[in-house]
Image: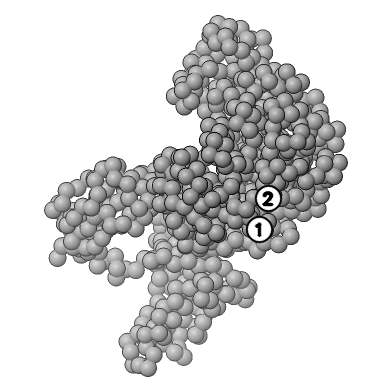
Amino acid sequence: MFRKILIANRGEIACRIIRTAKRLGVGTVAVYSDADAQARHVLMADEAVHIGPAPVRDSYLVAERIIAAARLTGAEAIHPGYGFLSENAGFARACAEAGIVFIGPPPAAIEAMGLKGAAKALMEKAKVPVVPGYHGDDQTPELLAKEAERIGYPVLIKAVAGGGGKGMRRVDTAQDFAAALAGAKREAANAFGDDKVLLEKYLVKPRHIEIQVFADAKGNAVHLFERDCSVQRRHQKVLEEAPAPDMSSQMRQAMGAAAVAAAKAIGYVGAGTVEFIADVSEGLRADRFYFMEMNTRLQVEHPVTEMITGQDLVEWQLRVAGGEELPLRQEQLTISGHAVEARVYAEDPVRNFLPSVGVLHRLRSPAENAHVRVDTGVSEGDAVTPYYDPMIAKLIVWDTDRKSALRRLRQALGEYQIAGVATNTAFLIALAGHPAFVEGDLDTGFIERFRSDLIPQQTPAPVSVLALAALAVTLERRAQAAAMSVGDPWSPWSAVNGWRMNDVGWDELIFKDRDTDIACRIEYVGADAVRLRVQDKEVLVQGTLEADGTLDAALDGRRMKIGIVRQGDDLTILLPGETHKLTLVDPRVVSAIDEGAGGQLNAPMPGKVVQVLVAEGAKVEKGQALMILEAMKMEHTISAPGRGVVAKINFQAGDQVTEGVSLLSIEGED
Ligand code: ADP
């Protein structure tokens, strides 16, 4: 076993690798960019080395810096995680040249699977079933059109160098072929610098089923069964499970044998995944699965395999890379129960899954136990930045059968409390509970087909939520007042906001719910309770605000613990599986701004200044657009909070800004 390894990655996968290394007594070295100086993986590792600025091409993708970091710290091996340099044969070679073990397959095996066309030809030779199609060198449009005809429409054009769904086109009729081919080639040339394509029969009802394989350098190879990753959105996996629903042992054996044959054909060593596509138009059939590609690394979804086999795949990787034999033989591996993984993302399903950046003001995860595992790379207070993948965590659950596992998944997802960014948890809960999904009626078109059932509705906050928010605001104000009036019973704070001891005072609170102002009448009934009246409804809510922002409340007698996060006037109310955002509108503050208020305007998130719309000295009106910031493919307009004069502009178009920096300042006008 190694004495010390370096992890050439970040986020949850770096943390996950460090966890196993620590358990095995192996020393760990993290690497980090400017944006990750305080990141969880850095804090977890024994040592950490800075490798450059935030953009990945300047840090996590710079092979020389990573190898230099390994040399500097005396790490004997490098684990590349997934993504970044994990499937880069050149990096694997450079490690070997530097005398460092690359924890992954031999460079030649990475290369053999690097191009889809060549990989398919190799697989055909190894008698692994491939999707009927054409993957020849002759790329003349006439020949390709003839091949498409032979395969039979619909066909799929794929870039041989492809990845991430780029350069891929479905063609339904011969008339559309020429235009689609030109489009796919153009996209492939742009994205990969290689416009070569292959053709495949397009399967109309496919399932994505992959096999985890493992091989050692002594000629042993096994598979650790399958994972079903059919629930995808734009070819990205959303939910993964093991075993695959309805899988017969005959089909499992056939797929496992094909995957092991694929690994052996390329002299594979280490962890790999052979991805297959299964035609399920007539159900799962052992003669209807086809090789798609092989990922020569650890996959994001490997934990579901660990949960059903009881094995630690990172431990296997370290042992095999260190020259040991595979820990188990095929006949010693068995499946126990069912595991499901959901990828919890900082993204907004309502806005077409746009990534959401910002500070995780609250991040409470479900409690981990024998049934629930959380793999994450962030902690409360960390930021989701535009530089890296906005995944917050992977939630993995296990139970004895699929339906129980899905119930646990919904339960655990409901325990998440996340404020500061939008998340897909409500979407995942809807997915995990969808009757068709629960029944195992799966294929890659599932999310699109049931889109309207799955995207959470934007409903106005119910009266109960307004009441909880009102109570939280009241309790907070009382706590502040109490703190300020200590020793001074006659302090004006004691009488703030209309409430008095032993009396039913009242006040009005205005909450903004998206674009609607809702005026609520609050009656103060006792020290820890309010009655909220809004329109013709009324609710009594009572409770205490705990130090960590948890509101322990009784709503018309019903007890609940919910999370309340307040950032300035913005309130996030976190109910199980449901999040509401309200803004407290303070009439006095609004009028003050209208009269002219100055101050700093800060960047709400890290991003790039796209345009500066005003000059220093310019007079501006309330709401006037001053600057445009781009973050995560989206533009954000910075506008004037009130009438005033632009005193100073701190950035120009093209400048990169970090969250919270002052962009410009305005002097209020009297
Ligand atoms: P990429 O490498 O660009 O991600 P893949 O070849 O892995 O492309 O395919 C991505 C996804 O596209 C698959 O998971 C599947 O959902 C779909 N797909 C691929 N090949 C076919 C096919 N022949 N018929 C139907 N869908 C396909």
Which one is in front, 107 or 116? 107
Quick check: 363 left or right of 668?
A: right
Q: Earlier in the sequence, mark 2 or mark 1?
A: 2
* Observer able to see residue 447: no
Q: Where in the image, quadrant-wise, is ligand 1 located?
A: top right
Which one is in front, 118 or 26? 26
Using the image, determine if residue 497 lies above or below residue 517: below
The residue drawn where x is 57% and y is 22% is: 160
To which quarter of the image does residue 233 belong?
top right
Using the image, determine if residue 164 lies above or below residue 547: above
* Observer able to see residue 323: yes
Q: Position of residue 285 (x, y in %)?
A: 80, 28
To which quarter of the image does residue 281 belong?
top right
SS under mark 2: loop
Which residue is disc 2 drawn over?
1
Q: Could you say which disc has been placed on residue 436 in the image? A: none
Q: Position of residue 456 (x, y in %)?
A: 56, 49
Report the Cα–Cα distance between label 2 and label 1: 9 Å
The residue drawn where x is 82% and y is 41% is: 329
To which quarter of the image does residue 365 belong?
bottom right
Amino acid at dot 1: Gly
**Callout 2: 10 Å neighbours few (<14), some, many (20+)?**
some
Which residue is disc 1 drawn over?
25
The residue drawn where x is 28% and y is 57% is: 662
The residue drawn where x is 35% and y is 53% is: 658
Do the residues under discs 2 and 1 have CB atoms within 8 angstroms?
yes
Which one is in front, 281 or 538? 281
